[in-house]
Amino acid sequence: MNVSCLPVSLFGKLDSGEMDLVEWAQVGPDLGLDGVDISMLFLKSHAASYIKKLRTAWERIGTPVVMATTYPDFTHPDKLQRERELLYFQRDMALCSQLNIPYLRVLAGQAHPETELRDGVRWAIDGIRRSADTADHLGIQLLYEDHSKPGAWEYVDFSYPPDIFLEILNGVWDTSVRVNFDTGNIDAYGRDSLEILKQVFPKVETIHVTDMAEHGRFSPVLIGTGVTPNLACFRYLKEQGWDKWLCIEEASGGGLDGIRQAVKNTRALWKKA
């Protein structure tokens, strides 16, 4: 089983410049990782010289960058802004293609108070479907996630409620878009992660392994110490013969030591399953 990590616990250091994306790739193997994930927020520039330098550095290190996360807001109430969001996301797809990052996470958008349910579902489906055409052309695999709330947003994800997530996924089911299934976000909402995993399994490409301190509240903790049914989810995946990337989202605040322990705990849970 291959394991990568989105280092949310290091976002402060990456944002301040104390650590950069090259250093993150360098330290990955020492933490027990087979690959690393990044947020598009931490690209220092979109200049051709910087992108080329970054790709060259990653190739020299040899640690694969598996997934990039970004934050398209397809449910914005303003039509012009929704068009901007699509263009921003197309830029991210182009950058991932150039950087040789195979997976790019796509979200529905924010739960803006002005956005009605039916409009938001329709806009999200439209935005993701239009994005899929570009991704297919560029050779990028889009992964729709059952998401909660990133720090980059003002509001929670429009499709944080699992029923909305399922409806939007159904609306793009016939496209190439697949799923990055987050085990903890369903649990944080107050639903059964395994129940939803079984419904979306045919589309599951990667797993965001997270853990919550308590059911029904967004409360990230070190993987293996919370209540999220990761073991049950892993058992189901192994029963189905699934063997792709476990992409840890480490948000416990434990820094590099926390990531190292999260990797150990995740591998132990997978083995136990």
Image (cartoon, grey):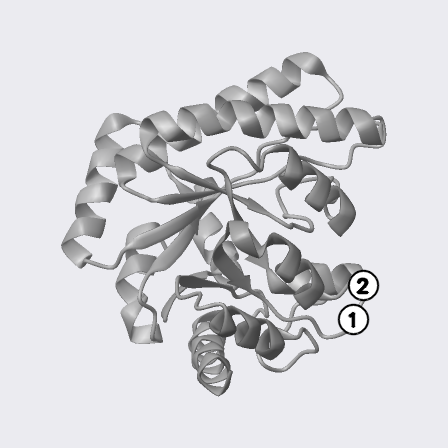
Callout 2 secondary element: loop
- On screen, residue 255 versus residue 196, left or right, reads left
| Residue furthest to the top | 80
Given residues 224 and 57, the one toward you in this image is 224
CA gap between label 2 and label 1 equals: 6 Å
**57 above or below 213?**
above
Mark 1 neighbour density, 10 Å: few (under 14) some (14–19) many (20 or more): many
Q: Which residue is mark 1?
A: 215
**60 above or below 98?**
below
User: What residue is at 73 percent from the left and 48 percent from the top?
Assistant: 160
Q: Position of residue 12 (x, y in %)?
A: 52, 56
Q: Are marks 2 and 1 in contact (CB under 8 Å)?
A: yes
**132 above or below 78?**
below
Q: Position of residue 241 (x, y in %)?
A: 43, 68
**Looking at the image, how many numbered discs can be counted on the residues?**
2
Q: Amino acid at mark 1?
A: His
- On screen, residue 61 versus residue 161, left or right, reads left
Dividing the picture into quadrants, the one containing residue 201 is: bottom right
User: What residue is at 53 percent from the left and 74 percent from the top?
Assistant: 234
Given residues 136 and 43, the one toward you in this image is 136
Residue 26 seen from this side:
yes
Q: Amino acid at mark 2?
A: Gly
- On screen, residue 266 versus residue 136, left or right, reads right
Q: Position of residue 61 (x, y in %)?
A: 18, 58
Q: Earlier in the sequence, mark 2 or mark 1?
A: 2
Q: Which residue is mark 2?
A: 190
Q: Quadrant of the N terminus?
A: bottom left
